[in-house]
Amino acid sequence: MAETILRIEGVSKFYPGVTALNDVSLTLEKGEVRALVGENGAGKSTLIKCIMGVEKPDKGKILLNYDGKWVENTNALEAQQHGVFANYQSVTIAPELSIAENYFLGHQPRTKSGLVDWKKMSEESKKVIDKFKMNVDPSKKIKSLPVAMQEMVTISKISVNKDIRLVIFDEPTALLENEKVEILFNYIKELKSQDVSIIYISHRLEEIMDICDSVTILKDGTYVDTKPISGVTKDSLITMMVGRKMSDIYAIDHQKPGEELLRIENFSDSRHFKNVNISVHAGEIVGLAGLVGAGRSEIMMALYGVTGKLSGDVYVKGKKVVINNPADAMKHGIGFLTEDRRTDGLALQLPIKININMNSYKKISHGNIISLQKETERAEEYSKLVNVKTPSVMQKAANLSGGNQQKVVIGKLLCFEPDVLIFDEPTVGVDVGAKQEIYKIIEKLTAQGKGIILISSYLPEVMGLADRLIIMARGHITGSFNHEEIKSLTEEDVLRRESIEAEQEA
């Protein structure tokens, strides 16, 4: 008989106006890889916070088998002392510290004289970095790394610990390219071989079918069922999660491209991209694919005026314009959905109402006086449009699930009413039902004559939606395909082009 490592008994958790968990009970065995699935707001993140001792259940108990004794984790430090670690959906590392300092935060190795042994810390960190094939200096500060690399640091940090009993992965692959996903899966298999138990949360159901032994489904904070992975299909899981069958989620109406809305010419900077030319037309979805470090996000941030460029021109509707900052970009009708919603997209401690209107107060102001009625009406309109699950637009953004936070950021972008919308990883941490809602929003926008630039690390998404697919590698465009050509492409074709080391231009 397998040994039970975790018992969750009748757990409930309540927030103002929201029942996050309602009488949830389940068990987990030693060495088992258990998927935890459900729509955004189903209670997954709340449950793992309770397991980690970050939140305390209002009812019920969470018990961990620690060397034959059943213990409760009253805080995150106690959970780690009991061998329980979590890789949260939002990157949770100290940005001002180096990789090595993050790895050994709170348990730095010491010399005989009691000082921090920086040499040993660097050497041990290098071993972890090499194991996870990150090719980065351990002295590098976290804030200087791309978000996807920060995610890999967060994942690999777990391996520094000696006593690991249970690891929780919350959307670990959301920003990772295929090579890094394979590294993560190999690590999970290594943990499983050591009898470490895994709770794996992902909206990518093909991953769950590939890596997990069993799956638990939550819906609206309640327990639905637990099944062996051999007893489910992706379609049956979706039905249990959302309560309905899903058609092809990428089946949107495509428009005939109209006038050119935006063009960038000969975009270059000192490190990330060189001589890049991209255009987008009315009603067109231009997809950007490429591995981490390909330069996709960096190009768009330079276009939006967030970062600088060495050279390059921007044309809006055929007219050359100068964009020095995001305010200039917005003035010219360009909107940008950032890939890091919590850091760049939201004011977490402010209500949904303010977040959605944040870029659009000029539209509801007269003589610098804001119409509070219009502020509320627009917030409610766009919250409803993107289907934010909340009791009120006065709810703080910090109190929403990750997927609903993403919807608020999208609502903020739509409320501004730009002509060209840059979506950088728009469905990160978003469940399959919400993904389809976002795709339908994109469909409506193109029908209105908007131009879309879609950056996605998830190949089925970018290939399934794009009218034109641009593939990048190491700051260069290595391929461009129209809608008909995309239909004949395979993911392997794209991956081959993503890995091309483009020749450096003179």
Image (cartoon, rainbow, N blue to C red):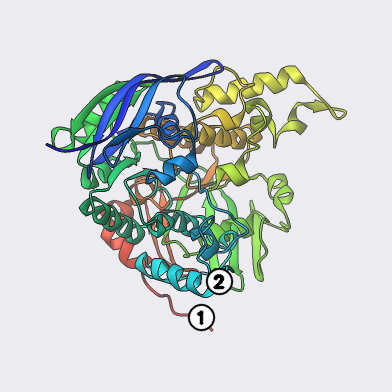
**Residue for point 28% across, 40% down:** 205
Q: Amino acid at mark 2?
A: Asn
Q: Earlier in the sequence, mark 1 or mark 2?
A: 2
**Residue for point 58% across, 72% down:** 113
Q: Is residue 191 left or right of residue 294?
A: left
- 99 up-or-down from 235: above or below: below
Residue situated furthest front in the rendering: 113
**Residue for point 56% across, 43% down:** 341
Q: Nearer the viewer, residue 457 or 479?
A: 457
Q: Which residue is label 2 attached to?
A: 275
Badge 2, how many Cα within 10 Å: few under 14, some, many 20+?
A: some
Q: Which mark is residue 505?
A: 1
Residue 262 showing in the rendered view: yes
Which quadrant of the rendered structure holds the N terminus?
top left
Residue 405, given in percent of the width and then of the height, sits at 54, 34
- 243 up-or-down from 55: above or below: above
Badge 1, how many Cα within 10 Å: few under 14, some, many 20+?
A: few
Q: Secondary structure at mark 1?
A: loop
Residue 336, given in percent of the width and then of the height, sits at 60, 46
Q: Which mark is residue 345?
A: none
Q: Is residue 262 left or right of residue 194?
A: right
Q: Is residue 95 left or right of residue 283?
A: right
- 287 up-or-down from 394: above or below: below
Residue 447 showing in the rendered view: no
Q: CA distance from mark 1 to mark 2?
A: 8 Å
Q: Quadrant of residue 376?
A: top right
**Residue for point 69% across, 47% down:** 332
Q: Nearer the viewer, residue 255 or 237?
A: 237
Residue situated furthest left in the rendering: 1
Residue 118, given in percent of the width and then of the height, sits at 55, 72
CB-based contact (under 8 Å), mark 1 and mark 2: yes
Which quadrant of the rendered structure holds the C terminus?
bottom right
